[in-house]
Amino acid sequence: SSVKALESTKEAITKGRSVLAELADTESEAAIVHSAFYETAMTYRKAVGPPEAYYREAIQYVAYTNLSELSQEERYNIATDLSLAALTGEGVFNFGEVVAAPALQCLEGTELSYLGELLSAGARGDVHG
């Protein structure tokens, strides 16, 4: 069942996190391992929530992933989901982290470009726009 699959995914993520801590290099093959781990964790958190947990995993995923290797649709989906998680996640206050993420740039010129503008305003503390 899907509940069992989610539970086994959660267990694998928990076990993998300690192994991942030993691979702290973003400029090597270790980045591939980090990327795959955070992609799994991000996908899991998108399925079960909460938004702030998705946000934490997704921000790590984009840090360790060469986004140019993803399709435009994948980048768009990640940027959208990451933006929404930042805006709705409890305790997410650092919008600058999202604004600095290269993934967010793919929303420019789309019907969701307002998400980037909203996050930028929040990062600047500009409530008047």
Image (cartoon, grey):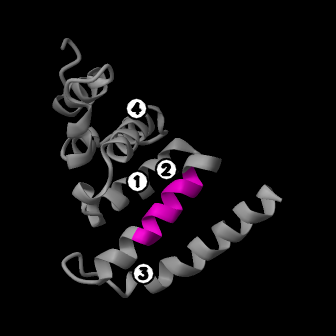
Question: Is there CB contact under 8 Å for labels 4 and 1?
Answer: no
The residue where tag 2 is placed is 54
**Image side of residue 94 versus residue 80, left or right:** left
Q: Amino acid at mark 4?
A: Leu
Q: Measured along the vertical axis of the image, is residue 7 above or below residue 47?
A: below
Stretch of the chain drawn in magenta: 36-45
Question: Where the C terminus falls, by quadrant?
Answer: top left
Of pointers 3 and 4, the one earlier in the residue sequence: 3
> Which of these two is toward me, 57 or 65?
65
Look at 44% across and 65% down and name the residue there: 38
Q: Amino acid at mark 2?
A: Tyr
Q: Nearer the viewer, mark 4 or mark 1?
A: 1
Q: Secondary structure at mark 1?
A: helix
Q: Amino acid at mark 1?
A: Ala
Question: Which class describes the residues within 10 Å of circle 1: few (<14), some (14-19), or many (20+)?
Answer: many
The residue where tag 4 is placed is 87
Percent x, y for residue 88?
47, 32
> Which of these two is toward me, 83 or 69?
69
The residue where tag 1 is placed is 58
